[in-house]
């Protein structure tokens, strides 16, 4: 074989090898990123962040460019609700798709002395996705039971890194529990405590980097990351990189660090080439705590690392135009920001005014990944994919949405109407608001709309029969048991 022919064959081989390698990389990448039946799912769930705590929801004092970007590239909801105004019941509803009253976790929140938790017979979003081949992780605050049988690793999560309850539940003496003395705040990795009293100034960044690492490790398979941040629940804290950066004091610093976290995750997903096949959701577990006057509970650790109270201005959140705050059934307690982004699937820059709830995530995600909903229990949430996909004339699937505080039914919404039927200290009442015309719940229009009042009272009676109501003594016909230590 002459030299020219040999050289030609060598060049031909190199070209074929190069083209083959390029096609292999291309099709491997395509296979990884184009299976829209198994998109990656990331739920970022903040703690006590209010309806008015984002620029995309009207705040003019906070700099939140990354959640703004999500709104510009996805869908923002104006009438999105969690199922309770406090931590534990809200989280139970999100993960199970059911009212917290139905799953036995409506009453207040779990404490370090609690011996109950989310029943392991419940099916969570993580359980459902794990069965579909997803790698699943929770990184952040759990608050659905701190005893081993109730930990996330027993509820469908492959990996857990975070704290088991609220960040203020340490070194406190709860008189209600026979002077139960709470010890240091534990930080878990899976089922083991790896640290106590972690410096809370760095929890947002630590959780973010754990999430980034999990995504990197599982980039070649479908993954579900549930990132329930600790902040801005009191004692609020931000890292050195954000302290003093906001025009709204430490609370603003904390919110802007959470926004940085969103950007860090969005950028990482994009850099890995997973952007078009990843659903990212941002929302909060309930409305903001609003302090009376100035000041709040901030992270100023004493010599052994415990949080102490400090009087600093602007340490409370904003619920924007909404009345009320955390731990209430006014709109400010349960209507929260909700932004969802999935490039090419959810219309960019869109806004939905339809009534939707955190309970809808379970059935909607099930539809997206092709999972069957359990048929042996009631799932209260609805598949809202028609709304998310921008389907023309898609409407809220809710005939009624029920506002429970603890085990008491306090209000019901249907369409634009909201009827308060019980206010603490006021007994049973009938106060009707038109939320389209009066988002701040300022003007009672019950006398002008008796038919509406009667219709919503009938809907409330359905809820009492179904799930119970301590105000009226209804026990409820369709309740599932809370998890208890055996």
Image: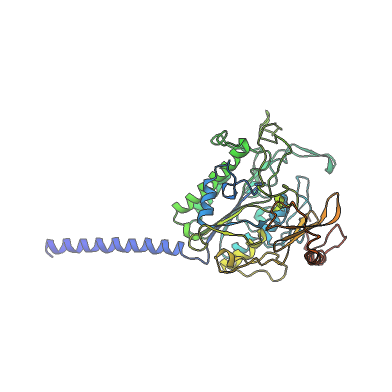
The residue lying toward the viewer, choosing from 360 and 329, is 329
Q: Nearer the viewer, residue 343 or 456?
A: 456
Height in image: 279 above or below 180? below
Q: Is residue 189 above or below residue 224?
A: above
Q: Is residue 220 left or right of residue 147?
A: left
Q: Please tell me which residue lies in front, 170 or 438.
A: 438
Residue 175: give x, y in percent of width and height: 83, 40
How far across and how far down the image is residue 425, in percent?
Answer: 86, 49
Q: Quadrant of residue 95?
A: bottom right
Residue 131 visible in the shown view: no
Position of residue 463 in the picture relative to residue 31 (left or right)? right
Q: Front-most of 231 and 398? A: 398
Task: Tell which residue pokes out farthest to the front in this image.
Answer: 448
Give x and y (percent) for residue 367: 59, 68
Quarter of the figure with the C terminus: bottom right
x, y percent for residue 471: 86, 57
Which residue in the rendered view is the most extreme toward the top?
303
């Amino acid at each position: 074989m002459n030299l020219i022919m040999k050289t030609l064959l060598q060049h031909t081989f190199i070209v074929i090898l190069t083209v083959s390698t390029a096609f292999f990389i291309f099709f491997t990448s395509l296979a990884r990123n184009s299976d829209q039946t198994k998109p990656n799912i990331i739920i970022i769930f903040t703690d006590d962040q209010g309806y008015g705590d984002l620029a995309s929801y009207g705040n003019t004092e906070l700099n939140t460019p990354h959640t703004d970007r999500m709104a510009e590239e996805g869908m923002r909801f104006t009438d999105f609700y969690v199922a309770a105004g406090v931590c534990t019941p809200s989280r139970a509803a999100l993960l199970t798709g059911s009212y917290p009253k139905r799953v036995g976790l409506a009453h207040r929140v779990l404490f370090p002395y609690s011996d109950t938790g989310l029943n392991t017979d419940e099916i969570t979003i993580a359980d459902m996705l794990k069965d579909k081949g997803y790698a699943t992780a929770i990184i952040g605050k759990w608050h659905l039971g701190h005893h081993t049988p109730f930990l996330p690793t027993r509820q469908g999560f492959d990996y857990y890194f975070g704290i088991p309850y609220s960040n203020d539940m340490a070194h406190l003496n709860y008189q209600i529990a026979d002077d139960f003395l709470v010890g240091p705040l534990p930080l878990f990795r899976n089922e083991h405590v790896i640290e106590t009293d972690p410096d809370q100034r760095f929890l947002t960044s630590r959780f973010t980097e754990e999430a980034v690492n999990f995504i990197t490790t599982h980039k070649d398979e479908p993954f579900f990351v549930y990132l329930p941040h600790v902040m801005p629940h009191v004692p609020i804290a931000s890292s050195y990189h954000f302290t003093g950066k906001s025009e709204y004091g430490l609370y603003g610093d904390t919110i802007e660090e959470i926004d940085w976290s969103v950007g860090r995750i969005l950028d990482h997903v994009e850099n890995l080439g997973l952007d078009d096949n990843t659903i990212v959701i941002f929302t909060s577990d309930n409305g903001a705590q609003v302090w009376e006057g100035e000041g709040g509970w901030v992270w100023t650790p004493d010599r052994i690392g415990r949080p102490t109270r400090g009087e600093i201005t602007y340490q409370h959140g904003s619920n924007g135009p909404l009345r009320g705050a955390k731990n209430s059934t006014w709109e400010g307690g349960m209507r929260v920001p909700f932004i969802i982004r999935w490039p090419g699937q959810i219309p960019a820059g869109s806004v939905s005014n339809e009534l939707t709830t955190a309970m809808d995530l379970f059935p909607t995600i099930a539809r997206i990944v092709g999972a069957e909903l359990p048929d042996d229990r009631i799932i209260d949430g609805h598949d809202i994919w028609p709304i998310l996909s921008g389907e023309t004339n898609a409407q809220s699937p809710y005939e009624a949405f029920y506002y429970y505080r603890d085990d008491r039914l306090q209000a019901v919404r249907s369409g634009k109407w909201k009827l308060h039927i019980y206010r603490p200290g006021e007994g049973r009442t009938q106060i009707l608001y038109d939320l389209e015309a009066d988002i701040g719940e300022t003007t009672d229009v019950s006398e002008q709309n008796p038919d509406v009042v009667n219709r919503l009272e009938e809907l409330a009676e359905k809820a009492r029969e179904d799930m119970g109501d301590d105000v009226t003594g209804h026990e409820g016909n369709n309740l599932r048991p809370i998890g208890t230590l055996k």
